Image (tube, grey):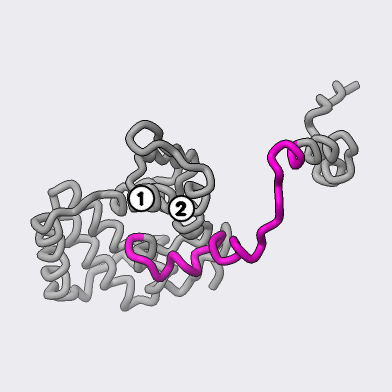
Amino acid sequence: MPEKEPSSWLDVKEAFFNSKVAKSFERLERTFGSKVEISAFAKLVNTSISSKQPFHRWVRYREGYAGDLVKEILRRYPVRIGKDYVVDPMSGSGSTLIACKEVGIDSIGLDVNPFAVLAGNVKGVRYSKKALSDILQVFEAVIKLPLKTGPFNNSNYLAKYFPSKNYKVLVSIKKRLEEVRKGFVKDFVKLALLSILEDCSNRKKDGNGFAT
């Protein structure tokens, strides 16, 4: 006979209709004075605002949210600048980190997704004029790059995600960027390449999967 599951493990339906769970939520609401503010946060819990803002708009991250959401939370629950710091355990593309940087608050972000880590690191750097000049030189070199027509390994499983012409151009750009050695420049241009892949592809990311 299988052992009875612990009472803390509830299926979704039971969680919604369990009286003990309901009373626990009611107690939390009384303790913390919860209230519904749909109109205030409707535009902040997605990327409709951040997709038009510097740094935040560098990459499309559908699971993201506006940095203004973080700023509003920090306004309501202030931290001591220079003494406290914000930790985001699932930092994604770095919205929390950028928002904290903009208001002068130290922050730490963690994420298991290498792309998210790269995006957060690149967007969080304070670039000098010299650094921006180095990055611009790489982009100018790519623009002048003669596009190779082959041979390309179209049997590569990645090829099916792109029209043939786009795939060849992307491979040429990737090979050129692999020659970059300076760390922060390499990361910047790598993120730039990754950020255009969806627009160049015949697939679109939707939620947790890809659609044609």
| As drawn, 61 above or below 97 | below
- Is 185 magenta? The answer is no
Does dot 2 land on a helix, a strand or a loop? helix
- Tell me if 97 is positioned left or right of 5 in this view: left
Q: Which residues are magenta?
A: 28-55
Q: Label 1 to label 2, Cα distance in Å?
A: 8 Å
Please tell me which residue is depicted at 23% across the width and 59% down the height of the picture. Answer: 189
Q: Which mark is residue 103?
A: 1
Q: Amino acid at mark 1?
A: Val
State the residue at coordinates (31%, 54%). 123
- Report the front residue among 98 and 145: 98
CB under 8 Å between callouts 1 and 2?
A: yes
For the C terminus, give its image quadrant: bottom right
Percent from the top left, x then y, of residue 47? 49, 64
Q: Position of residue 128 (x, y in %)?
A: 14, 54
Does 30 lie within the magenta span? yes
Few, some or many C-alpha atoms within 10 Å of disc 1 (few <14, some 14-19, many ≥20)?
few
> Looking at this view, is 13 or 74 the one in front?
74
* Label 1 vs 2, first from the N-terminus: 2
Question: Residue shown at 28%/68% (left/top)?
Answer: 170
Left or right of 8: which side holds 189?
A: left
Q: State the residue position of label 2.
A: 71
Q: Quadrant of residue 156?
A: bottom left
Q: Tag 1, which secondary structure?
A: loop
Q: Is residue 105 above or below residue 56?
A: above
Pick whichever, 72 or 172, lies toward us: 72
Task: Determine whether, in the image, residue 200 is placed left or right of residue 147.
Answer: right
Q: Give the percent coordinates (x, y) of residue 28.
A: 74, 37
